[in-house]
Each structure stands twice: as structure tokens, then as C-alpha cells.
Image (spheres, rainbow, N blue to C red):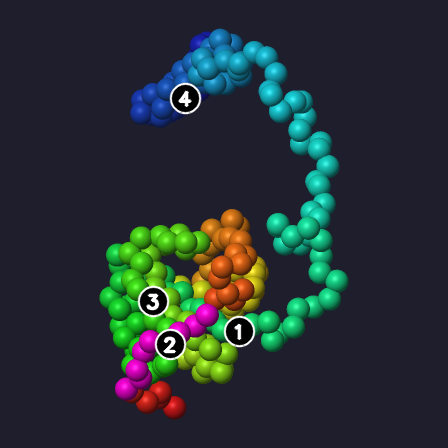
Amino acid sequence: MVDDEGTNRDLSPNRRQVIAGLAGAALGAGALSAQDPQGRGGNRRAQGKSPWGEETYKEPTPAPVSVRPGEETLPATPRKYTDIQSYHAHIYFDEDTHEKAALLRRWVAERFHVELGNWNREPRGPHVTPSFYFGFTNDLLPVIVPWLQLNSLGLTILLHPNTEDPRADHLYYALWINRAQPVNAYGMKKPGSDRPSVEQIYPNTKPTVAIET
């Protein structure tokens, strides 16, 4: 039964209170919308024009000169694989994984004749997180790549060749184990005339453990 004021007498007091509360909220929202039609809680849009112009979404997408930023033109022919003179493996770690990195570092030194670098506890060069690296000659590639795939301990590892273009080596010719992460190599340049055109590898480890086969 409904009375003259439209109140449903069959509703319980609790349900009437809920309906009354919803109606009040709706009326309050309507009042706010009338005061602030943009719905920004009193924050009005700034008057004026954007320094970028109007309707920038209509700008055409520019076509890059090359598929690889920084190159002036696409190469006319493929590069020779013999341009690769050696490889680097960069192993990344943090405060949660440094023990894994230490174990992997020891395993590498025990098993491979490589150039083992120092610990980099802070970002160094193009590498944005702590890391260490080891360099190795081309003949070890068929062994070290599968060995690292099976013994990475879940660490992020960057493998890149060494050619006369270190920027491309780190950005475009790289292989990743587990996952990739940013490498800040866009500013890298080719070595000057006072340095070898390709970074040299000078092994400094003395393997004492046979590689598991």
C-alpha cells in the first residue's frame, strides 16, 4: 500500500532508511554538478592554449629514417659475421640476488678461460643496475651460451658481441637470458684512434674444474 506521499508502507524501516540515503546522495551529486559542470571538484581548467598547439592527435606519425634509431640509413648489405671478434656476458644482480651472482661468478672462473671483470656494485657504463661481466673468445660461444642458459640461476644476463660498433653491440646485436632490461647505450661511440677498433679480451682466469657434460 502506498500513501499520499509515495511512501511504501510494506518496506521495513531499514530499507526505507537505505532508500532515503540513496536519494539524498543523488540530490547532492546533482547539486555539485550544477556548481562544477566539469566534475573536477572545484578545479577549473586553465584558460589559454597549449604550447603544443591544438588537436595534436591529428599529427601524422613520422616514418623513421632507419629501423634502428641513430643510424642514418638502412644498411645496403648484411654485415659479415666475422666482424665479431669476441663476446661479453653481463650478469645483473641486486640486494636479493647477489648471492646467486657470486655463485655463478665462481662457477664461471672455475670452468672457463675468460676475462673476468670486477664487481660493479653500482651502475656502470651503459648498465643501469649492479653487475659483473666476463669476456670470452668466439670459440667458447657454443659452450658458454647453453651453459649459461642452464646455470643462470634466474639472473638477467646480457650477451653481446664485440665489433667496432659498441653502441650497436649493446642495443641491436644482443642476446638475453631470462629477461631483458634497459641498457643506456645510445650515447656510446666508436673507439678513438688511440684505442683498438674492437675491445680486446685478455683472459685472466685459470680453470680448475672440468665442464659438466
Upstream in sequence: badge 4 or badge 2? 4
- Image quadrant in which the C terminus is located: bottom left
Q: Is residue 213 left or right of residue 195?
A: left
Check if mark 3's residue and mark 1's residue have beta carbons within 8 Å.
no
Whether residue 132 is situated above or below residue 39 in the rendered picture: below
Q: Which residue appears at 49% of the width and 59% of the height?
A: 194
Amino acid type of disc 3? Gly
Residue 167 visible in the picture: no
Q: Which residue appears at 28% of the width and 56% of the height?
A: 121
Upstream in sequence: badge 2 or badge 1? 1
Secondary structure state at the residue bearing disc 3: loop
Residue holding disc 2 = 203
Q: Which residue appears at 37% of the width and 19% of the height?
A: 21
Whether residue 212 is situated above or below residue 180 in the rendered picture: below
The image's mark for residue 179 is none
Upstream in sequence: badge 2 or badge 3? 3
Upstream in sequence: badge 3 or badge 4? 4
Residue holding disc 1 = 85
The image's mark for residue 22 is 4
Q: Is residue 165 magenta?
A: no
Comparing marks 4 and 1, which lies closer to the viewer? 1
Q: Is residue 182 left or right of residue 154?
A: right
Circle 2 Cα neighbour tier, 10 Å, few/some/many (<14 / 14–19 / ≥20): some
Q: Which residue appears at 69% of the width and 47% of the height?
A: 64
The image's mark for residue 117 is 3
CA gap between label 2 and label 3 equals 10 Å
Check if mark 3's residue and mark 4's residue have beta carbons within 8 Å.
no
Which of the 4 image quadrants contains residue 209?
A: bottom left
CA gap between label 4 and label 2 equals 76 Å
